[in-house]
Image: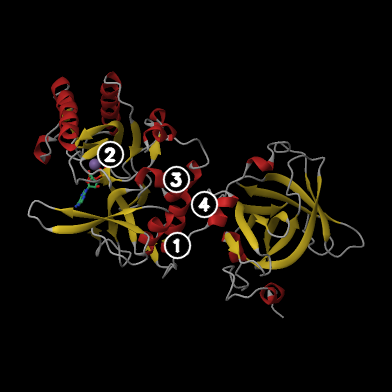
Amino acid sequence: MSKLSVYNKKRNFNKTTEPIGKSSKRAKKLRLCIQHHIARKDHYDLRLEWNGVLKSWAVPKGPSYNDKDKRLAIMVEDHPIDYRNFEGTIPKGEYGGGTVMLWDKGYWEPVEGYQPNFKEGPIKFILKGSRLKGMWTLVKLKNDDTSWLLIKDKDEYHLYDDINEFNTSIKTNRTMDEIKANIKHIEITNPNKIIYKNPKVTKMDIVNYYKAVSKRMLPLIENRLISTIRYPNGSQKDKFYKKHFENIYGFLGKKKIVNKEEKQNDYYYIKDINGLISEVQMNSYEFHIWGSLANDLKHADMLVFDLDPDELLSLEKLREGVKDLKRILDEYKLDSFLKTSGGKGYHIVVPLSAKVTWENARTIAKNIAKLMEAKWPDKYTSNMKKEKRKGKIFIDWVRNTKGATSVAPYSLRVRDKLTVSMPIFWNELDKIKSDEITIEKAIKRLRRKDPWGEYKKYIK
Ligand code: ATP
Ligand code: MN
């Protein structure tokens, strides 16, 4: 009998999206995950990799960092290793029906000299998760097949934190309610398609990335016209800009625009997470936004300054450029927000609360670029031409033209590396390179304060 036959027997895989149980090969390090599971009862599931499966315990009160607490842990059926990535909802009426949040993930190892005994206990082990760390012990209660106690050993991690402070997913940064609200699952086709080989990134990783950042990204992009860059084959070769509306999933907004030649075209915008994820399903991996809302295309509601350095310019000089521009914006009492481009430069975004016509927006941006050029002619140019850029930074103010785009905050950049156009704090400028934020780093940063939190004031 397979080790996972109990697991498989309990579940109907036509109804649940949990992974089918297959035992796996041993990896170099022993993996671990903890899920917060609100089913009939609220509990945490501790899972430790052992011999190709995840040994599992349901911990009703959850683990505690206090070494005085002894938390009951009920041993349950072995789970497949793939379960360590599972998060989502299990349909009502199915086994474990409810909501599952991936609460912690990482590695574990038995404490030296203590061969773990999964039948009789005890198991003394070190957890190397993001939230649970340090030494722990599982002891089995006598005269009971399934009851164990989970206890924190005394070390530098005991009394470290109250686990209830961690109420969002380690994978997608969502709360339980947000996981439950879920995405109207749009089926992701070819989820395992490899987009980057090294480090490996699949289409599903990209879907999960956008789900994870959606809470912060959506307010900054929704209801403004976008164009996306599509990668139908995952490769750079066949990419194309997609600007026009196409109704496949029914989640996108449509806006008719008549151009100078009186030709009509339908443009599109994202209204919610379903629109965002349906675009990713269609292989749109980069998102580029207009500087106005779809319902008011005559006015700009933001300015963007794109600092494009000459190829040979040092990072130091580029950062100096960002600071010089910031100082000018401060003098004009314009709030400004900083993000990496994910490529060679930084972008500075100035939200506008007043109604500013595109003509005026363009003039303001141009004058600021011209001012920099006049003040520091050897450092900056407002001229787009590459030959005028030698040793200088082009302050690209032309983005501030009706219909022009700039890459959206939190958009991925599909370049040599897969990077993120990442909102950062001003005081992080000297620490963060323009192309260093990867999916993994971006998701880690979501747990910290929002560097663009103040932007909310400007969102209508
Ligand atoms: P980098 O820091 O490497 O310059 P970037 O995003 O600033 O990255 P740019 O080439 O300077 O890239 O372009 C600025 C913006 O202009 C982009 O963010 C994009 O929105 C838009 N853009 C660039 N090329 C195109 C294009 N071929 N079609 C439509 N929009 C484009
Ligand atoms: Mn640029």
Q: Which residue is mark 1?
A: 204
Secondary-structure class at tag 1: helix
Q: Which residue is mark 2?
A: 345
In the picture, residue 205 is in which quadrant?
A: bottom left
Q: Is residue 232 above or below residue 261?
A: below
The image's mark for residue 172 is 4
Q: Position of residue 84 (x, y in %)?
A: 60, 60
Mark 1 Cα shell of 10 Å, populated few (<14), some (14-19), many (≥20)? some
Going by the picture, which residue comes out furthest to the bottom? 1
Apparent side of residue 256 relative to residue 145 in the rendered image (left or right): left
Q: Whole-Å distance between the Cαs marked 2 and 3?
A: 17 Å
Q: Whole-Å distance between the Cαs marked 1 and 4?
A: 13 Å
Check disc 1 and give the amino acid type. Met
Sequence-wise, the earlier of marks 1 and 4 is 4
Apparent side of residue 293 relative to residue 74 in the rendered image (left or right): left
Q: Is residue 250 above or below residue 153?
A: below
Q: Is residue 107 visible?
A: yes
Q: Whole-Å distance between the Cαs marked 1 and 3?
A: 16 Å
In this rendering, the label closer to the viewer, 2 or 1: 1
Queried on whether the Cβ of the residue with tag 2 lies below 8 angstroms from ligand 1, the answer reads yes
Q: Which residue is mark 3?
A: 442
Q: Quadrant of the C terminus?
A: top left
Whether residues under marks 4 and 3 lie with C-beta atoms below 8 angstroms apart, the answer is no
Q: How many dots with numbers?
A: 4
Secondary-structure class at tag 4: loop
Check disc 2 and give the amino acid type. Gly
Q: Whole-Å distance between the Cαs marked 2 and 1?
A: 28 Å
